[in-house]
Amino acid sequence: MRTSLSGCARQPVDDRPACLQRMRDTDVEHMAELHALLWSRGWPLASRVGEDAAFSAFLVIQHAHSGVQAAALPAVSLSVWQGELRPAALALLTDRVLTRAGRPQRYGTQSMRWPLWPATVRLPVLEPEKLDERRRALGLSPLP
């Protein structure tokens, strides 16, 4: 599915726009099929479709528009707590939904590269002093 395209950040800067466009095109292609699957059968559980397929479905949602992301968040959360999806999925999607709504993130997964600024900057985090504790609760490593 889209996991082969997830390495755009590792591409040379000049190649990134084309890589990102391929990723967007792939997401659009798979969104309709995934949407039908979600409504007819529910979230694709790792125990039924395999861990890679379940995470690939999550990646399509992660790069969908904000309404789809917010609607999928409860299913992703439940799947993570049932052991059917990698914990990183919950952190990534929660933070994506929050930051797109203009709110501070919980797990510190979202960052941004500003034009003409060479460094990547982590977007604001809710109660930064508790960040490692929240990440640990999901089984994630502390951030540097």
Image (spheres, rainbow, N blue to C red):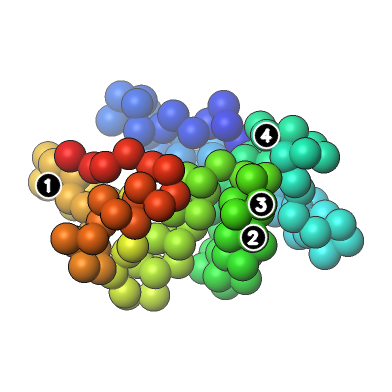
Mark 2: give few (<14), some (14-19) or many (20+) Cα within 10 Å. some
Q: Which amino acid does label 1 sit on?
A: Leu
Q: Which amino acid does label 2 sit on?
A: Leu
Q: Quadrant of the N terminus?
A: top right
Left or right, 51 with respect to 14, comes to right
Give the structural element (helix, strand or loop) at label 1: loop
Q: Eyeballing the image, is 26 above or below 121?
A: above
Q: Eyeballing the image, is 50 above or below 74?
A: above
**Disc 2 target residue:** 78
Distance Cα–Cα, label 1 vs label 3: 43 Å
N-term mark: 1 or 3: 3
Distance Cα–Cα, label 3 vs label 4: 13 Å
Distance Cα–Cα, label 1 vs label 4: 39 Å
Q: Are marks 3 and 2 in contact (CB under 8 Å)?
A: yes
N-term mark: 1 or 2: 2
Q: Name the residue: 39% across, 60% down.
A: 95
Nearer to us of marks 2 and 4 is 2
Residue 51 marker = 4
**Disc 1 target residue:** 116
Distance Cα–Cα, label 2 vs label 4: 15 Å
**Disc 3 target residue:** 82
Q: Do the residues labelled 1 and 4 touch (CB within 8 Å)?
A: no
Residue 63 marker = none
Give the structural element (helix, strand or loop) at label 3: loop
Give the structural element (helix, strand or loop) at label 2: helix
Q: Nearer the viewer, residue 114 or 101?
A: 101
Q: Eyeballing the image, is 21 above or below 137?
A: above
N-term mark: 2 or 4: 4
N-term mark: 1 or 4: 4
